[in-house]
Amino acid sequence: MLYLYDGALNVSKILKDWYDEEANSNYGAYIPFVGTVRSEDGISGLSFDIYEPILERWFEAWQEKARAKGAIIKMAHSRGDVMLHESSYIAAVFSPKRRVALEFIDEFVEDFKASAPIWKYDLKDGQRIYASDRSTAIKGSGILGVKK
């Protein structure tokens, strides 16, 4: 359950929709994580490019790990521009047990930051500037890891 949106995410709607979708699934835990664009270095927002085929494979590998524990993971991410104090990333784990959900959300978010093929740009002074100082090259990505 990977969802990609153009622009900022509607956090309350997405979280409510996900809760409603799983309300009768007998999960004992629903742990969401919401990432919000914060003010730093004079930016007015962030912009995102996504390489969807690799992201889908990466996400499916996480779904398989979750299924092995009786859980599911849902994720939403923005494409394009997201302004300050808006959300660009939401992830949630639904699990029969809270410990599984708590551990999975932590591992998932950390691996997302290190491995997802999403490139971040600062929006500053009307320009879109690659945020190389806050980016991590994707292991095995070759030229995809050094986008400028």
Image (cartoon, helix red, strand yellow):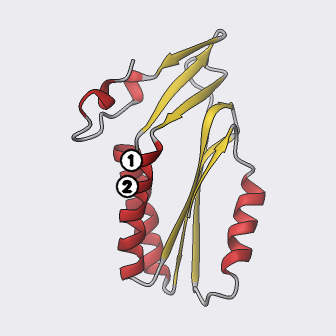
Question: Residue at (67%, 21%) from the top-left corner?
Answer: 44
Amino acid type, callout 2: Trp
Amino acid type, callout 1: Ile
Describe residue 66's horizontal placement relative to residue 45 as left or right: left
The C terminus lies in which quarter of the figure?
A: top left
Q: Give yes or no for contact between labels 1 and 2 (Cβ–Cβ under 8 Å).
A: yes
Residue 4: image location, x then y, percent: 60, 48
Residue 74: image location, x then y, percent: 55, 64
Question: Could you say which disc has been placed on residue 58 in the image?
Answer: 2
Estimate how packed mark 1 is, as few (under 14), some (14 to 19) or many (20 or more) residues with alpha carbons within 10 Å. some
- Up-down: is 122 above or below 61? above
Question: Residue at (45%, 39%) from the top-left corner?
Answer: 51
Residue on which disc 1 sits: 54
- Up-down: is 114 above or below 80? below
Question: Residue at (34%, 46%) from the top-left corner?
Answer: 115
Estimate how packed mark 2 is, as few (under 14), some (14 to 19) or many (20 or more) residues with alpha carbons within 10 Å. some
